[in-house]
Image (spheres, coloured by chain):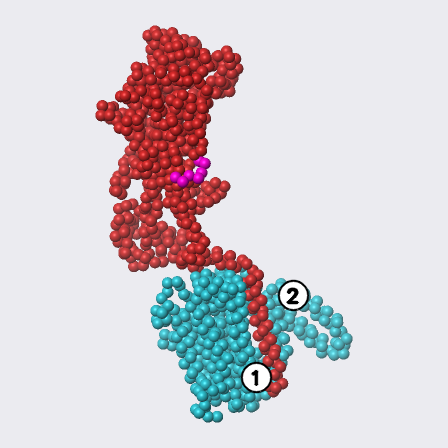
Chain colours: A red, B cyan
């Protein structure tokens, strides 16, 4: 029987070979023809992990670190590994109840699953961290402390300049054109220098490829790290800012609303920029960031509003040097030009009052400046805009005047290297045509002559104008960053370029500078005198109006003072505004003077300490606003926290 | 023949022993690759059998002892006790139905002193022996329908009980005995019918039944038209054609839908649909998909031993047991897979060669049975890992992790070697 069926051996062998051939052809397709499986395998098993570099450090002009990195710890949990721990003890340390503990564990499981780590308590306060670290062996391996870098501001100053970093928002993530390189959860600069110089501060993120298992748990380096790229730390910024000067300014602006801007006229480097009242930048780092932010955001004193670049004020009398410069350059006056003021300007229908009555107080430009004669400058303004060589105010005079203002840096953003700069307002022909429907003349805008009316400047613009006067025509765009370590960008190019203002003659500047030194020497700004230093300055007391209960109401005057020193070789140009306080000589000039003394002499002389004390104690902010403000308690908390840390 | 005088290993078929050892060692290495993590202390794990590969090493040791015992047993013992063993096997299977333990949804495990044991594996051996005994007995005339039915019953009764234990995969293996019966004279037309049946089932699953029924109708009409002269000569021809037509129609229209809704379990239906590409449920396709990714990512040369990312990091489920072929496919690629399959083909062909050199029908039937079982396991297991067959949980012979399976295949092969060594005798 078997003999008959012997050939069937061949059939069975063929069946086996056939099946194996089928398998091999399928393998050929899977392993050689089809390429997608290799990619799918990588997607399965290779974890791309971003390694964050440490962010660049910011130094002041004396190479003091004013914005660095601190390490805080997150408590992270792996829910699957939490077994047999003293939950009550952990809750006690973290100051949470058992219900909250349960909730956080469940949240972690929902978010990342049982076997992966989730943050259980972020950015632990130092004392909590200390307690936890000692007893960590009780809670491991379910719980672990993981370090995280946060920004820290050792001098607790310059909040609005330095800015802060925060987690990228969903809206930004969608904007791939600008934020394409960021991932959800990344931190980036939101304001100030942190934002402007984000690209250099952030450094270069490294990428680490890790092998992961089916539950996404990392299992080690992929291909021995052959494809990994190292993280490159962010570049450090070196500022022209003097942090001690900045601190002094912030202390003096306590209880006041306003700002100080001090610039080195030789470089355009900003030495200090204070917006009062200020807040401790450390409030916007660490675990209470968002809570503090909303408190600052809603505070009645508006500390997040950087008044130095965002607020605009009528410059008042501090504007008179600029009026004089235009008059001199247009040739409508000479330095010896005088005006017979008898206590008011009667050139237009409504008299403009002057503080001085004695004849001869405006006998020439120097005298008029040092006495701040309103009549004189109203007259000079009208002469300038009505000048026949431009065909009168409407033909070209008004526009010519506005052009002068633009070359002084008014009416447009100057281009400082922090965001949100305001442009202010310089009214021109178009403005008045629109506003008065063509029926206007030089009397309509005569208040511009004394820095009132429609004109609005930012404190930065005022300080920059002082640079132009001090430099006799030229200026550099005011900026904070003097250099970037290992700079390979062109971010700073525009700040190295010298700008020439209106080509106004040197003699015109000399006349104005003389007038301004007289202001401090013998005029309205005598309080600003510093022993051994010649100061050119100008006081200002600006009328202003606000809407109170829906009615346009005259508010308390803004006090202003602009100055530069030493007059013969200026190293600092400054503008100070103290809102709704009173006379410029009383409230603004001392602040400016103390700032200049600190910068030029490195300290305040003992003789002037009482003045400093008085300035610091002066409160000009409205009591009703202060009563509702939490700013002081917030700042105190931040200082307490810092003390605890160290 | 007096064996005590001769060399102890006299008559042993070394090629089969070599191929056997090669497969077991590849198996242990693959299980190791599936489990090993960079920081494992290998020696510690081997001494304390707490890993699959170390346990498999222990099973290998036990298997070698079994092999030695079988080698020292007289061949006549196997022919003499074949029926007894078959009866014992059936009894065990029934026992499992009663007191068995559920493991991963199948009620097919016995627990004896802490060890889990699957009688369904062992009964393959018993059935093979009983079938060989029946076909080789002098009273059996395998050209008779009655003998063939009895032989089929011997093969399928255990399969029936195993289906009751929810181990459909292992039960399917018993159909491999039809290969033996084919060799012993079962009409070839049965193979054709079986093949046609598979095609019919697949087309019934793949093609809409009304469309399929219309096709049958058209084909039948054409066949009748072209064979109208023959039909005129022989009326019965028409009856056959119409009979086939009626059967196919009924099968497609009623049997398949009925089987799908009433007979097969939900998960079985889903697995079949996954294989046919009709189901995209990610949960159901996960195993096959991960297995295909692992094998496909191996490329031509593979990623190298212990370098597969898919098999080492638990992406493929049942990594050491049913999906062990993934490790070979990923680590050694297309090239390694072909070598691996070639070892199996060599083993199968060698067993067939050994079968054909026997004087005893018993040994020949037994040998073909062994070849059939190994072939079925191999074909279904590998086809399943590469998406050619639905996921049926049957192990890769000698390679997959599992004591019952390794010992059963060891016994199957070493009994064959024992019988072959005594091929001069006529065993019945």
Residue A293 horizontal/vertical position (percent): 36, 38
**Count of numbered marks:** 2
Label 2 in the same subunit as label 1: yes
**Label located before the other in sequence (2 or 1):** 2
Q: What main secondary structure does the magenta stretch of the protein show?
A: loop
User: Which residue corresponds to the image point at 33% horizontal and 49% vertical from the top-left?
Assistant: A147
Instruction: Give the residue at mark 2.
Output: B212
Residue B2 horizontal/vertical position (percent): 46, 93
In the rendered structure, which segment of residues is drawn in magenta?
A485-491
Which image quadrant is residue B45 in?
bottom left
Q: In this view, does B83 lie above or below A490?
A: below
Magenta residue check for A302: no
Instruction: Give the residue at mark 1.
Output: B356
For this rendering, which residue is in front, B239 or A305?
Answer: A305
Residue B72 horizontal/vertical position (percent): 43, 86
Label 2: element kind:
helix
Label 1 marks which chain's residue? B
User: Which residue corresponds to the image point at 26% horizontal and 46% vertical from the top-left?
Assistant: A127
Label 1: element kind:
helix
Residue B258 horizontal/vertical position (percent): 57, 68
Q: How crowded is mark 1: few (under 14 residues within 10 Å), some or many (20 or more)?
A: many
Label 2 marks which chain's residue? B
């Amino acid at each position: 029987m078997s003999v008959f069926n012997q050939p069937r051996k061949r059939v069975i062998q063929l069946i086996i070979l056939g099946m194996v051939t089928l398998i091999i052809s399928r393998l050929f397709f899977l392993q050689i023809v089809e390429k997608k499986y290799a990619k799918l395998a990588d997607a399965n098993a290779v974890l791309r992990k971003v390694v964050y570099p440490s962010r660049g450090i910011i130094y002041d002009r004396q190479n003091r670190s004013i914005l660095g990195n601190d390490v805080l710890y997150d408590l992270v949990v792996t829910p699957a590994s939490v077994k047999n721990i003293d939950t009550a003890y952990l809750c006690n340390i973290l100051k949470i109840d058992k219900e909250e503990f349960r909730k956080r564990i469940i949240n972690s499981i929902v978010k990342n699953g049982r076997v992966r780590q989730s943050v259980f308590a972020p950015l632990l306060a130092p004392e909590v961290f200390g307690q936890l670290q000692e007893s960590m062996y009780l809670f491991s391996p379910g719980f672990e402390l993981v370090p995280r870098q946060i920004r820290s501001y050792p001098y607790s100053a310059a909040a609005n300049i330095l800015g802060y970093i925060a987690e990228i928002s969903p809206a930004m993530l969608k904007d791939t054109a600008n934020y394409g390189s960021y991932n959800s959860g990344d931190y980036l600069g939101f304001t100030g220098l942190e934002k402007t110089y984000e690209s250099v501060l952030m450094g270069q993120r490294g990428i680490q490829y890790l092998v992961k298992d089916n539950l996404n748990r990392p299992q080690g380096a992929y291909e021995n790290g052959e494809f990994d790229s190292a993280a490159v730390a962010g570049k450090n910024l070196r500022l022209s800012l003097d942090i001690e000067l900045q601190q002094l300014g912030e202390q003096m602006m306590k209880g006041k609303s306003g700002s100080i801007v001090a610039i080195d006229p030789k470089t355009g480097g900003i030495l200090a920029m204070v917006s009062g009242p200020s807040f401790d930048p450390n409030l916007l780092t660490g675990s209470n960031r968002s809570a503090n932010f909303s408190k600052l955001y809603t505070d009645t004193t508006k500390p997040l509003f950087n008044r130095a670049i965002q607020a605009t004020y009528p410059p008042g009398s501090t504007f008179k040097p600029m009026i004089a410069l235009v008059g001199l350059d247009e040739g409508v006056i000479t330095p010896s030009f005088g005006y017979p003021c008898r206590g008011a300007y009667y050139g237009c229908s409504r008299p403009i009052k002057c503080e001085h009555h004695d004849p001869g107080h405006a006998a020439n430009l120097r005298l008029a400046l040092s006495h701040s004669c309103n009549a004189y400058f109203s007259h000079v303004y009208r002469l300038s805009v009505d000048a026949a060589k431009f065909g009168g105010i409407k033909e070209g005079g008004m526009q010519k005047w506005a052009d002068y203002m633009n070359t002084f840096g008014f009416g447009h953003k100057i281009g400082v290297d922090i965001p949100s700069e305001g442009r202010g307002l310089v009214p021109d022909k178009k403005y008045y045509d629109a506003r008065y429907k063509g029926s206007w003349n030089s009397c309509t805008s005569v208040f511009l002559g004394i820095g009132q009316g429609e004109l609005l400047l930012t404190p930065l613009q005022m300080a920059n104008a002082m640079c132009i006067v001090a430099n006799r025509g030229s200026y550099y765009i005011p900026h904070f960053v003097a250099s970037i370590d290992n700079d390979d960008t062109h971010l700073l190019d525009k700040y190295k370029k010298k700008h020439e203002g209106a080509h106004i003659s040197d003699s015109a500047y000399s006349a104005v500078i003389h007038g301004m030194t007289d202001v401090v020497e013998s005029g309205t700004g005598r309080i600003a005198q510093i022993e051994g230093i010649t100061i050119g300055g100008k006081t200002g007391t600006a009328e202003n109006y606000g809407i109170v209960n829906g009615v346009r109401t005259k508010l308390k005057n803004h006090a202003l003072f602009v100055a530069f020193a030493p007059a013969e070789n200026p190293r600092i140009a400054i503008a100070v505004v103290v809102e709704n306080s009173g006379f410029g000589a009383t409230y603004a000039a001392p602040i400016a003077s103390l700032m200049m003394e600190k910068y030029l002499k490195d300290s305040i002389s003992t003789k002037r300490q009482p003045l400093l004390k008085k300035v610091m104690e002066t409160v000009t902010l409205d009591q009703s606003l202060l009563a509702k403000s939490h700013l002081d308690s917030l700042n105190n908390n931040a200082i307490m926290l810092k003390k605890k840390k160290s | 023949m007096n064996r005590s005088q001769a060399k102890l290993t006299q008559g042993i078929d070394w090629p089969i022993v070599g191929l056997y050892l090669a497969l077991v060692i590849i198996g242990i290495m693959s299980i190791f690759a599936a489990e090993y993590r960079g920081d494992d202390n290998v020696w510690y794990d081997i001494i304390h059998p707490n890993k699959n590969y170390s346990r498999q090493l222990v099973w290998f040791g036990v298997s070698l002892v079994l092999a030695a015992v079988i080698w020292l047993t007289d061949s006549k013992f196997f022919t003499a006790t074949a029926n007894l063993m078959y009866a014992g096997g059936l009894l065990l299977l029934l026992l499992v139905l009663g007191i068995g333990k559920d493991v991963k949804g199948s009620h097919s495990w016995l627990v004896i002193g802490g060890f889990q044991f699957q009688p369904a594996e062992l009964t393959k051996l018993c059935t093979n022996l009983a079938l060989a005994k029946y076909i080789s007995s002098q009273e059996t005339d395998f050209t008779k329908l009655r003998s063939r039915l009895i032989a089929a019953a011997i093969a399928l009764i255990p399969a029936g009980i195993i289906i009751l234990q929810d181990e459909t995969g292992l039960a399917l293996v018993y159909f491999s005995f039809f290969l033996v019966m084919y060799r012993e004279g079962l009409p070839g037309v049965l193979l054709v019918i079986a093949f046609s049946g598979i095609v019919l089932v697949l087309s019934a699953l793949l093609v809409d039944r009304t469309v399929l029924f219309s096709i049958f109708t058209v084909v039948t009409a054409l066949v009748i038209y072209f064979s109208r002269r023959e039909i005129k000569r022989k009326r019965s021809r028409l009856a056959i054609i119409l009979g086939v037509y009626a059967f196919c129609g009924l099968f497609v229209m009623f049997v398949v839908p009925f089987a799908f809704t009433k007979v097969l379990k939900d998960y079985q239906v889903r697995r079949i649909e996954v294989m046919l590409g009709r189901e995209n449920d990610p949960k159901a396709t996960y195993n096959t998909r991960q297995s295909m990714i692992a094998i496909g990512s191996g490329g031509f040369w593979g990623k190298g031993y212990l370098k597969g990312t898919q098999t080492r990091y638990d992406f493929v489920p049942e990594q050491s047991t049913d999906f062990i072929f993934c490790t070979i496919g990923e680590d050694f690629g297309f090239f390694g897979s072909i070598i691996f399959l070639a070892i199996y083909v060599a083993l199968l062909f060698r067993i067939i060669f050994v079968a054909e050199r026997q004087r005893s029908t018993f040994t020949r039937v037994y040998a073909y049975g062994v070849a059939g079982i190994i072939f079925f396991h191999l074909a279904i297991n590998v086809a399943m890992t590469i998406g050619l067959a639905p996921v049926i949980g049957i192990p890769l012979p000698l390679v997959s992790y599992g004591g019952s399976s390794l010992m059963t295949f060891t016994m199957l092969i070493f009994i064959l070697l024992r019988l072959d060594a005594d091929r001069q005798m006529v065993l019945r």
